[in-house]
């Protein structure tokens, strides 16, 4: 079958690879109808997420149809339409039973390399999904009306927005700043707004990203550079500082920006973007006196938030599909990666 594979640092290729087989009774094989390129895929290419095999299949956002089921799968039927979770959990350990799937004893992720369980990904014609009962969601009932483009983000970035908003305890008096207006930042902004935040402001160093968020989704935004970002935020919010600032980038300069936008009276910083070996020096006294709360989300707890995310879309409260700018065939994936990495594209979808 055709698949997008890691072809060495910075490169992907479309190659013919072996079709996945059932390896465990709890596996499902899904015929992929639609997949997408995520910021986390770029980390596989840029080396921030190490341990991807050359020839390993990338990709973890997908909607498809169940082609084959292992004997141990209890909650799915062949030939049904499903959404996949990027996070692969066991569904049975103490953490999973407490619905903290992102801290599963056997936590893995699709298409993100050896450190995440060495599972082949979903930018392919077929993908093997372990523990299918936990990691696939049937798109039935109220969700059956969702198009593939509306449903696909429930398995990663939209669930991420909901997780980040919940972790930030968003309330009606919150002034929320989102640093990084890529796909993830825009989902965080949408989720914060839906949770009733007083205001939501998106920040990005790339003017095109801020403009896209404003034009397509109606968010107020600021292009950040060397200027005093605190003053810029206060100027845009009628003199207020952020009560919640989310880092939807995963880079120390962005985290610094988030901290600088926060009120000195108990602000909350929520870190959504992926970090690797970076280090950060914290001014302890300033953090202490301002009651700074820093919350890392860790991997998104997809299975705890995908219902909320998908029902919000089904009700028409959120329109995540509006971020899609490029719809490509799998064969054109390398061009899609280029467009996404250069930020010419907001979100790239791939059809096998
Ligand atoms: N926690 C999770 O489970 C989870 C899930 C999905 C994605 N992510 C992570 O979220 C992050 C964002 O993903 P994405 O798909 O939106 O990627 P993206 O690369 O498209 O978006 C990042 C955005 O940040 C902007 N940016 C870079 N440096 C900045 C700075 N200093 N200040 C302000 N903006 C800056 C870029 O211009 C870009 O628009 C990635 O690190 C990704 O791996 C985490
Ligand atoms: Zn992702
Ligand atoms: Zn588990």
Image: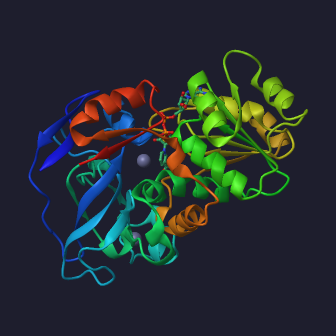
Ligand 3 occupies quarter: bottom left
- Point out the residue furthest to the right here: 239
Q: Quadrant of residue 338?
A: top left
* Quadrant of residue 263 within the rendered picture: top right
Q: Is residue 1 left or right of residue 159?
A: left
Residue 334: x and y, percent? Answer: 27, 31
Please say whether residue 309 is visible from this viewpoint: yes
User: Which residue is pictured at 39% across the width and 78% down the height?
Assistant: 92
Give the answer, above or below, for where 262 lies relative to 244: above
Looking at the image, which is closer to me, 323 or 29?
A: 323
Residue 16 coordinates in the image, percent (x, y)? 9, 44
Check the image and report above or below for 206 versus 12. above
Quick check: 109 above or below 203? Answer: below
Q: Quick one: 3 or 350, which is closer to the camera?
A: 350
Q: At which x and y percent is residue 202? A: 68, 36
Q: Quadrant of residue 169?
A: bottom right
Whether residue 281 is visible to the viewer of this picture, yes or no, is no
Answer with left or right where residue 277 lies relative to residue 73. right
Question: Which residue is at the front of the view, 145 or 169?
Answer: 145
Residue drawn at the location 67% of the way across and 22% of the way down: 224
Residue at image position (56%, 61%) is 313
- In terms of depth relative to the viewer, which is nearer, 45 or 210? 210
Give percent across and percent down for residue 227: 74, 16
Location of residue 38 with respect to 96 vertically, above or below: above
């Amino acid at each position: 079958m055709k698949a997008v594979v890691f072809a060495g640092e910075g490169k992907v290729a479309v190659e013919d690879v072996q079709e996945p087989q059932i390896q465990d009774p709890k596996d499902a094989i899904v015929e992929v109808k639609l997949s997408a390129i995520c910021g986390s895929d770029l980390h596989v290419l840029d080396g921030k997420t190490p341990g991807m095999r050359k020839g390993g299949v990338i990709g973890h956002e997908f909607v498809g149809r169940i082609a084959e089921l292992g004997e141990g799968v209890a909650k799915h039927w062949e030939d049904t339409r499903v959404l996949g979770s990027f996070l692969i959990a066991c569904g049975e350990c103490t953490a999973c039973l407490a619905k903290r799937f992102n801290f599963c004893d056997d936590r893995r992720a699709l298409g993100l390399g050896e450190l995440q369980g060495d599972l082949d990904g979903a930018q392919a014609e077929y993908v093997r999904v372990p523990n299918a009962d936990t990691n696939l969601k049937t798109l039935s009932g109220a969700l059956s009306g969702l198009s593939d483009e509306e449903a696909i983000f429930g398995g990663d970035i939209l669930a991420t927005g909901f997780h980040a908003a919940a972790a930030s305890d968003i309330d009606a008096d919150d002034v929320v700043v989102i640093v990084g207006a890529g796909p993830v930042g825009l989902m965080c902004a949408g989720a914060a707004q839906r949770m009733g935040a007083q205001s939501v402001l998106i920040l990005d160093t790339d003017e095109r990203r801020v403009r896209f968020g404003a034009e397509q989704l109606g968010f107020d935004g600021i292009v950040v550079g060397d200027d005093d970002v605190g003053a810029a935020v206060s100027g845009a919010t009628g003199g207020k500082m952020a009560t919640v600032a989310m880092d939807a980038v995963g880079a120390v300069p962005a985290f610094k920006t988030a901290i600088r936008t926060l009120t000195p009276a108990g602000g909350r910083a929520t870190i959504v973007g992926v970090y690797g070996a970076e280090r950060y020096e914290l001014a302890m006294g300033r953090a202490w006196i301002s009651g700074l709360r820093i919350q890392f989300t860790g991997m998104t707890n997809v299975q705890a938030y995908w219902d909320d995310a998908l029902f919000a879309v089904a009700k028409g409260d959120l329109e995540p599909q509006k971020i899609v700018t490029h719809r490509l065939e799998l064969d054109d994936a390398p061009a899609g990666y280029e467009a996404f990495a250069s930020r010419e594209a907001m979100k790239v979808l791939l059809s096998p």
